[in-house]
């Protein structure tokens, strides 16, 4: 495995050359969205300048070119994630829509009042709220595996919850809020052994770690392009083919049909049954060069690189007595470092960091139940990616010191 050369990679990302408040930008908000390499930006510009036309509709050259470019991205994606067939990958607007698609098109048809959906207290709101809406509509029960105070899941508690026979087990592979890396394969295996349909939120996994859907053995997996160097507005739902075939459409309209009469409509084949209307085809096509870029660098290289930067950042925080959330075991942590400065609101921390050109995320990270369990209203969060380097960690350390000096913080050691 060749070492990742972040300094060289940074040359591909134009935005990293800009100044913020007169300081070099240190972009550490990659769990929210990633920056885009020149290869993706130029591909998108070329698409609109030379190929743009609506897809799957025309017989003219531009429409055929546009269609082929968009579908080429789907084929590349299938190879990237080990999907058995490209047509089992549904393009949505975002991962939130992917999870809602499962709730509307699968659960509404196959779950009945009294059935249980099992999730965890670690989830993003997008993997909680759709199930709450469905529970209110259909009388479905919701259960959540508790999160331990170190931010991990106790597998004994997972097994106990699964023993009660949920019809669906849906969980995140990797926490966006505190960086916990869950034992995905084991959780999938336990869910399947219990007879549940298993859905994995892989939004924070797919950009950073290799996955092979054929090996995973899940039933649904969701993620999004914009966290993987790709354009915004492109989410992905992979589903096991027989489940997708059995589901009804999510939305009705153009292109998702096979035949329409005034009395009845029949559905198009996969994946178009779930892609009603004009899709976000230009951004879908530009997802292709993003996948090429990640493949060339190598996900294992990316994971090792950002993990090393995150551990250095955690060491800096702990040396200053800051509160760092998440597991203490480095093997259970990702490139996300979530922390609090005792006595300061996370928004004050984020504003102070921005004055030094350091972009971190602050707030509850769309995980209010998790924040409640960890007894905090929110955190500041630094999250790393392939183009971050030692200079970003040094900028983070300077921003932290100036924040502590400005607010005259004298924290007590108390890391958990």
Image (cartoon, rainbow, N blue to C red):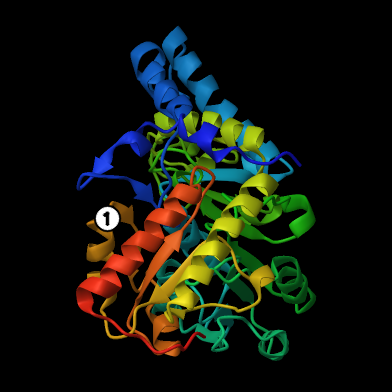
Of residues 227 and 169, the one nearer the viewer is 227
- Secondary structure of the residue carrying numbered label 1: loop
For the point 64% across and 77% down, which residue is it? 167
- Expressed as whole percent of the image width and height from the top left, the position of residue 386 reads 54, 45
- Expressed as whole percent of the image width and height from the top left, the position of residue 378 reads 34, 77
Q: Is residue 97 left or right of residue 199?
A: left
Q: Is residue 114 left or right of residue 317?
A: right
- Expressed as whole percent of the image width and height from the top left, the position of residue 399 reads 32, 62
For the point 61% across and 81% down, which residue is it? 152
- The residue indicated by pointer 1 is 356
The relative height of residue 412 versus residue 53 in the rendered view (above or below) is below
For the point 62% across and 74% down, which residue is it? 168
Of residues 140 and 392, the one nearer the viewer is 392
Residue 394 appearing in the image: yes
- Could you classify mark 1 by the number of other residues whose Cα lies within 10 Å: few (under 14), some (14-19), or many (20 or more)? many
The relative height of residue 53 versus residue 405 in the rendered view (above or below) is above
Picture quadrant of residue 371: bottom left
Residue 52 appearing in the image: no
Badge count: 1
- Expressed as whole percent of the image width and height from the top left, the position of residue 261 reads 42, 37
For the point 38% across and 43% down, which residue is it? 233
Of residues 118 and 34, the one nearer the viewer is 34
Residue that sits furthest to the top in the current view: 61
The relative height of residue 285 versus residue 4 in the rendered view (above or below) is above
Q: Is residue 173 left or right of residue 99?
A: right
């Amino acid at each position: 495995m060749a070492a990742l050369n972040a300094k060289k990679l940074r040359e591909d990302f134009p935005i990293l050359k800009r100044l913020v408040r007169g300081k070099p930008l240190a972009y550490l908000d990659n769990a929210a969205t990633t920056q885009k390499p020149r290869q993706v930006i130029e591909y998108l510009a070329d698409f609109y300048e030379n190929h743009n036309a609506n897809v799957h509709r025309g017989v003219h050259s531009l429409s055929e070119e546009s269609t082929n470019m968009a579908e080429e991205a789907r084929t590349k994606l299938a190879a990237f994630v080990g999907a058995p067939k490209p047509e089992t990958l549904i393009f949505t607007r975002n991962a939130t829509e992917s999870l809602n698609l499962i709730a509307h098109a699968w659960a509404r048809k196959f779950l009945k009042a009294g059935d249980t959906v099992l999730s965890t207290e670690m989830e993003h709101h997008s993997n909680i709220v759709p199930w709450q809406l469905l529970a209110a509509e259909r009388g479905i029960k919701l259960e959540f595996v508790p999160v331990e105070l170190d931010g991990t899941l106790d597998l004994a508690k997972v097994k106990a919850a699964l023993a009660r026979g949920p019809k669906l087990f849906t969980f995140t592979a990797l926490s966006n809020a505190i960086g916990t890396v869950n034992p995905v394969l084991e959780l999938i295996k336990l869910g399947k052994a219990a007879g549940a349909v298993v859905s994995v939120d892989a939004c924070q996994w797919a950009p950073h770690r290799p996955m092979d859907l054929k090996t995973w053995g899940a039933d649904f997996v969701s993620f999004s392009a914009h966290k993987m160097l790709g354009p915004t507005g492109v989410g992905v739902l992979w589903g096991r083919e027989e489940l997708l075939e059995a589901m009804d459409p999510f939305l009705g309209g153009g292109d998702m049909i096979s035949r329409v009469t005034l009395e009845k409509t029949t559905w198009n084949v996969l994946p178009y049954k779930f892609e009603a209307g004009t899709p976000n085809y230009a951004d879908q096509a530009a997802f292709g060069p993003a996948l090429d870029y990640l493949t060339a660098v190598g996900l294992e290289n990316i994971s090792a690189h950002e993990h090393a930067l995150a551990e250095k950042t955690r060491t800096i925080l702990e040396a200053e007595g800051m509160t760092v959330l998440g597991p203490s075991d480095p093997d259970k942590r990702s490139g996300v470092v979530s922390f609090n400065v005792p006595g300061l609101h996370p928004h004050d921390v984020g504003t102070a960091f921005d004055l030094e050109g350091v972009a971190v995320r602050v707030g509850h990270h769309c995980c209010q139940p998790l924040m409640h369990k960890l007894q905090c209203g929110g955190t500041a969060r630094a999250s790393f990616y392939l183009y971050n380097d030692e200079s970003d960690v040094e900028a983070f350390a300077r921003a932290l010191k100036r924040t502590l000096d400005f607010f005259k913080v004298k924290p007590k050691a108390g890391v958990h």
